[in-house]
């Protein structure tokens, strides 16, 4: 039984050992990313000074992610998915080892670094998402996604600010190498913790075509996939442009860390409140609110860019993301759990979802590359952000028609014989 103190913080939720371990591993990942990923783009920018180079680096990453998801998905159907999680974390460790080795010549290895990062992210998130699907149930998914968001926000508060402070105190690129080394250590600790997770083997063959074709019969699944494509449309470009803009405007890594501290502090509070207060009945309204706020915030960046506007943008986005992502992720897993052969094909469902998400990211970066190649960066980038930044706004218009009622009550539900099957030992209803 959990202590009264823990229950006051977390709510009336029974947390299993595997769920707790998965949260810790996710927290270590979040801290490593918060420390380094923000500054990897700045590290490369300082060497290259070209948005086009950053776009190519990030394009390689999002191109290799779906390839890694497919490969990891096949592997997961043959071996313990915890091993796949371990492979993902190990590849991410290799990414940082490579960055440390190539050092100030990193801009000459953009494609290699992007590919390594993409493969690591793909393997990690395939295994992490499958394990999330298995160790959570419909009544614990909002808690898990929300608490993971809390950990991510807490890491986002400490990581960038601490890293920015360290970098500004050290000469040349020395501070960058220190934080990359710390990130490496955190990933190695995460690898060790995976040994304590319960072994979980999936049976059967890898039937990705079956899940792709499921779109024709299951409208809920089709809507989820289309929503994920538009989610990726925003993420592909925004993941590197905003970070570099903060640095370019301030020319100071500590300012970038301060930006992360302020925005993540807001996000931390919002994740906690939404985790505790949001009811499933309000999921779609929360998604709409988050999508509108995310798109509206972009207009702060279109004219007369300055640090104050960037901070304001970050605060609005930090309110919007928890409101959108907590219900959206939970709704996604609920749709998968009610889909055809969800117990047997859950790995394939995760892979296909991530392929659509990364297809959106690829489209976003390709649009960015084409635009900055043809037109002056300072004029075209704000326009690109207005176009691809609408991605999260469109999510609501796909998920609003999703219905999760029982087949007898919902004419759009798919009446499969094995729907609602509970797999022994998975800890989740699928």
Image: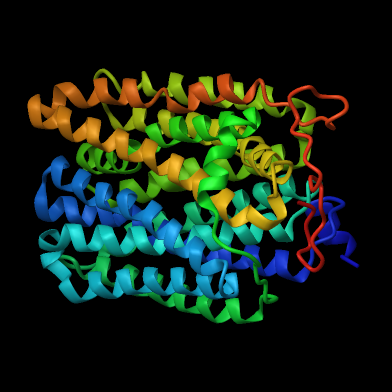
Instruction: Name the side, left or right, on which 93 lies relative to 43.
Output: right
* Residue visible at 39% across and 47% down in the picture: 258
| x and y, in percent, of residue 104 in the image | 13, 67
Q: Quadrant of the N terminus?
A: bottom right
Q: Quadrant of residue 92?
A: bottom left
Q: Answer whether residue 168 is visible to the viewer in this image.
A: no
Residue drawn 19% across the image and 47% down it = 56
Report the colour scheme: rainbow
Front-lying residue, 407 or 334: 407
Image height of 115 relative to 230, above or below: below
**How many discs appear?**
0
Work out whether residue 201 or residue 306 is closer to the camera in this orientation and state it: 201
Residue 305 shows up from this direction? yes
Image x and y of residue 293, in percent: 51, 22
81 relative position to 102: left or right? right
330 left or right of 27 in image: right
Question: Against 384, is 69 above or below?
Answer: below
Residue 367 sits in quarter: top left
The residue at the point 46 percent across, 78 percent down is 188
Question: Residue 21, position in %: x, y?
Answer: 67, 70
Percent from the top left, x then y, of residue 361?
36, 39
Left or right, 125 with reference to 313: right
56 relative to 195, above or below:
above
Residue at coordinates 63% horizontally, 39% vertically from top-left? 332
Quadrant of res 95: bottom left
């Amino acid at each position: 039984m959990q202590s009264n103190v823990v229950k006051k913080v977390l709510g009336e939720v029974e947390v299993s050992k595997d769920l707790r371990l998965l949260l810790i591993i996710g927290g270590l990942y979040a801290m490593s990313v918060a420390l380094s990923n923000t500054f990897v783009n700045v590290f490369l920018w300082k060497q290259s000074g070209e948005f086009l180079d950053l776009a190519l680096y990030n394009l390689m990453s999002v191109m290799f992610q779906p390839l890694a998801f497919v490969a990891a998905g096949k592997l997961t159907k043959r071996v313990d998915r915890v091993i796949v999680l371990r492979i993902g974390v190990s590849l991410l460790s290799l990414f940082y080892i490579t960055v440390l080795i190539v050092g100030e010549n990193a801009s000459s290895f953009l494609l290699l670094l992007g590919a390594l990062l993409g493969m690591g992210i793909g393997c990690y998130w395939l295994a992490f998402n499958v394990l999330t699907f298995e160790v959570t149930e419909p009544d614990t998914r909002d808690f898990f996604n929300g608490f993971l968001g809390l950990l991510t926000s807490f890491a986002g508060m400490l990581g960038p600010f601490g890293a920015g402070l360290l970098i500004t105190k050290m000469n040349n690129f020395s501070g960058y190498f220190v934080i990359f080394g710390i990130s490496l250590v955190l990933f190695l600790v995460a690898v060790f913790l995976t040994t304590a997770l319960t072994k979980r083997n999936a049976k059967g063959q890898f039937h990705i075509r079956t899940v792709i074709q499921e779109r024709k019969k299951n409208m809920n699944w089709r809507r989820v996939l289309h929503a994920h494509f538009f989610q990726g449309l925003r993420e592909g470009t925004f993941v590197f442009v905003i970070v570099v803009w903060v640095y370019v405007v301030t020319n100071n890594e500590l300012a970038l860390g301060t930006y992360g501290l302020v925005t993540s502090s807001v996000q931390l509070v919002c994740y906690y409140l939404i985790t505790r207060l949001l009811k499933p009945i309000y999921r779609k309204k929360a998604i709409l609110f988050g999508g509108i706020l995310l798109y509206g915030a972009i207009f702060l960046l279109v004219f007369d860019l300055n640090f104050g506007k960037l901070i304001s943008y970050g605060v609005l986005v930090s309110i919007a993301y928890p409101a959108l992502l907590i219900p959206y992720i939970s709704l996604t897993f609920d749709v998968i759990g009610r889909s055809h052969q969800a117990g047997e094909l859950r790995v394939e469902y995760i892979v296909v979802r991530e392929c659509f998400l990364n297809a959106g990211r690829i489209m976003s970066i390709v649009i960015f590359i084409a635009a900055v190649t043809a037109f002056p960066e300072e004029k075209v980038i704000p326009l690109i952000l207005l176009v691809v930044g609408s991605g999260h706004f469109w999510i609501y218009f796909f998920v609003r028609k999703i219905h999760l009622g029982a087949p007898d009550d919902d004419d759009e539900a798919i009446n499969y014989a094995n729907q609602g099957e509970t797999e022994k030992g998975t800890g989740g209803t699928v």
